[in-house]
Image (cartoon, rainbow, N blue to C red):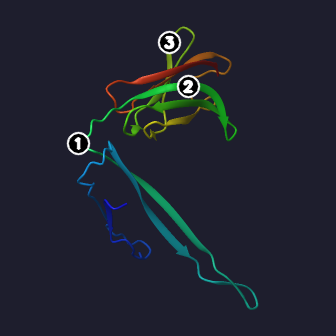
Amino acid sequence: TGWIAVNPQRFVLKKGERKIVTVSLDTPKEPMGLKEYRSMVFAQTTDERPAETTAPGREMRIRTISRIGTKIFVNNPAAAVKLDCAVTKVAEGTRDGKRGLEIQTANSGNVHIQSDNSKVAFRDEAGKSVASLPLPSFSVLPGQKRTVFFDLPEQGKSKLEKGKKYNALAVLDYGGSDLVAGELEFTY
């Protein structure tokens, strides 16, 4: 995008070598009605192994290319920012053979939300707090929903007991003036 500059853009590093790369932001002078500017900067690495002879007259080369993207969000200081988030659904689910909770959130604000300090609290049938575990960090763009999968702890690695009923309370800190939550009663 035209408002991001990366210097230097290309270079070669020897093994163990480091280089400082400067990323400069110059958002447009005219606000264009946007509440937030968004973009990504990608870093790509290439690693090529020396050629190997696989058979007489045949050579094999292997090149590994990795690409990493870094999200950039810049609030427009001339626009009114509205942070608004809700937990729209909490349900049991499985992913990669692991049991967990699917926590769906919706962003009805006008800028992205970032949730870095959220948690899932577990209470027993009597309402006593049993455990509180961190929820993985996530972000949601304006007008979008995101479902975050939370792995339930393996048996014996928390105070949750197999066969007992619990209330899971997903408490999200999205950067707004309040916290939002959703809950689910389930059997561990």
Most foreground residue, 23 or 111: 111
Q: CA distance from mark 2 to mark 1?
A: 34 Å
Q: Earlier in the sequence, mark 3 or mark 2?
A: 2
Name the residue carrying label 2. 89
Most foreground residue, 114 or 97: 114
- Residue, far right: 55
Query: How dense is the environment of label 2, judged by Cα within 10 Å: few (below 14), some, or many (20 and up)?
Result: some
Q: Classify the position of the C terminus by image quarter.
A: top right
- Examine the rendered structure and indicate whether residue 146 appears above or below residue 15: above
- Residue, x 59% and y 31% (percent of image)? 102
Q: CA distance from mark 3 to mark 2?
A: 23 Å
- Residue, x 45% and y 57% (percent of image)? 69
Looking at the rendered image, the disc whose residue lies closer to the viewer, 3 or 2, is 2
Name the residue carrying label 1. 78
Amino acid beneath label 2? Lys
- Examine the rendered structure and indicate whether residue 152 appears above or below residue 21: above
Per the rendering, the mark at residue 128 is 3
Element on which disc 3 rests: loop
Q: CA distance from mark 3 to mark 1?
A: 47 Å
Residue 110 screen position, x and y as percent: 37, 36
Most foreground residue, 106 or 165: 106
Residue 57 screen position, x and y as percent: 74, 91
> Is the residue under label 2 in contact with that under label 3 (CB below 8 Å)?
no
Amino acid beneath label 1? Ala
Element on which disc 1 rests: loop
Element on which disc 2 rests: strand
Q: Classify the position of the N terminus by image quarter.
A: bottom left
- Whether residue 157 is visible here, answered yes or no, is no
- Examine the rendered structure and indicate whether residue 92 appears above or below residue 31: above
